[in-house]
Image: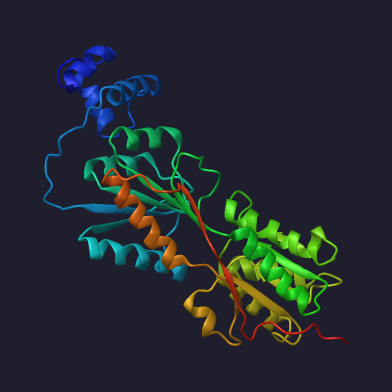
Amino acid sequence: MSERPTIAKIAEQAGVSVPTVSKVLNGRSDVAAATRARIESLIQEHGYRRRSASTAAGPMIDLVFSQLGGEWAMELIRGVEQVARAEGVELVLSECGGALRPRQEWIESVLNRRPLGVIMVFSDLDADQRAQLETRRIPFVVVDPVGDVGDDVPSIGSANWNGGRMATTHLRNLGHQRIGMIGGPTDTLCSRQRVDGYTEGLRSTGADLDPALIRWGDFSVGGGYREALVLLRQPTPPTAIFAGSDMQALGVYQAARELGLDVPRDLSVVGYDDLPVAQWVTPALTTVHQPLHQMAELAARVVLDLSRGKTPTALRLDLAVDMKVRQSTGPRSVS
C-alpha cells in the first residue's frame, strides 16, 4: 500500500469484509484463527493504527493480576499507583479469576480502552493475545513471570533462587537437619526457583535431601496450613519449615499451634515476601524480603518508557532479596 492504510484496504488484501477486520481490531473472539492471523499480519506489516474515538478518559495503565486480594497484591498496587499518580496516569485493575491467562473478553476491553500499556502480575498472555497488543502498539511488562516469557518480553522479578538458598542456609546455620519446604504451584517459575534454592542450600551445607520434606501447594494461608500438617505428622517431622510465602507461613503457625508446638522452640519458621503482617504476628516472622513495591514501581516506569518509544536497558530484571531475621527462628532444640 503506497497510500495511508485503511480498514477497507486491509480487508481487500486479506480477502475478508470490513466488519471482519473491525472485529480483529477490537479483539473480538468470533473470528477464525487463520483469518485473524492473516489480518493481524497485514495490520502489523502496514503499520495501521486506528485513531481513537475518544481520549476523554485520559491516559491509563492496565494492571492485571491472576487473583486480587491480600497484602501481596496491595504492595504491588501501591507501587504502580505511586508512579502513575506522579505521571498523571489513571490505573485500571483487572484479575484473571485465579487463571494464569486472561480471558479473551479482557483483551477486547483493553483494545477498547487503548491504555498506554499493560502490566501483567503473576499471569501471562498467549501468543495470540500478545500479537493483538503488539499490533496496536500497546506495550506490556510481566511482573513475577509465571514461566519463561522469552528474551523479547520485558519482565520484572526477584532473585527467587537466591532467596530460597538464603532461607535454607539460615536454618542450617541454626543447626536444623530436617527442614521442610512448602512451595507454591509447580507450574510457576518463582515457586520452582525457591525450591531449587532450598535444595542448593541443603547441598552446599552438607545436608541430605529428603523428597518427603518437600510439599507443593499454593501461596495461601490455607495451603500452608494443610501442607504443614502433612509435614509435622510424619514419623520424623522437620524441626524447621521454609514456607514459599508469608501467607503460607501463617498457615504453618496455625498447624503448629494445633499440634501443641511452640514457635520457635519446637519449630522454626521462615516465610517469603516480607509483607507488613510479618512484623506484627507473634512471634514476628523471619522472612526473605522481596522488594515488591520497588518491582511494581520499576514495571510502571518501564511500561511508560515503552509507550513513549524508549527501549529499556535490559528486558529481564531480577531485583536482589535479603533476609529479615526476627523471632520465628532459633537453634534446633536437642531433646
Q: Residue at x 11, y 51 (%)?
A: 56
Q: Residue at x 40, y 24 (%)?
A: 33
Q: Is residue 256 placed above or below 67 in the rendered structure? A: below
Here the colouring is: rainbow
* Residue 277 screen position, x and y as percent: 50, 79
Q: Residue furthest front?
A: 313
| Relative horizontal placement of residue 271, taking residue 66 as reference (left or right) | right
Please tell me how many numbered marks the rendered image carries: 0
* Residue 191 screen position, x and y as percent: 61, 57
Q: Residue furthest right?
A: 335
User: Depth check: 10 or 324 in front?
Assistant: 324
Q: Is residue 71 placed above or below 109 in the rendered structure? A: below
Is residue 94 visible in this depiction of the protein?
A: no
Q: Residue at x 18, y 32 (%)?
A: 50
Residue 161 image-quadrant placement: bottom right
Residue 273 image-quadrant placement: bottom right
Instruction: Point out the image quarter for the C terminus.
Output: bottom right
Q: Residue at x 81, y 67 (%)?
A: 205
| Relative horizontal placement of residue 168, taking residue 149 as reference (left or right) | right
User: Depth check: 192 or 301 in front?
Assistant: 301
Residue 47 image-quadrant placement: top left
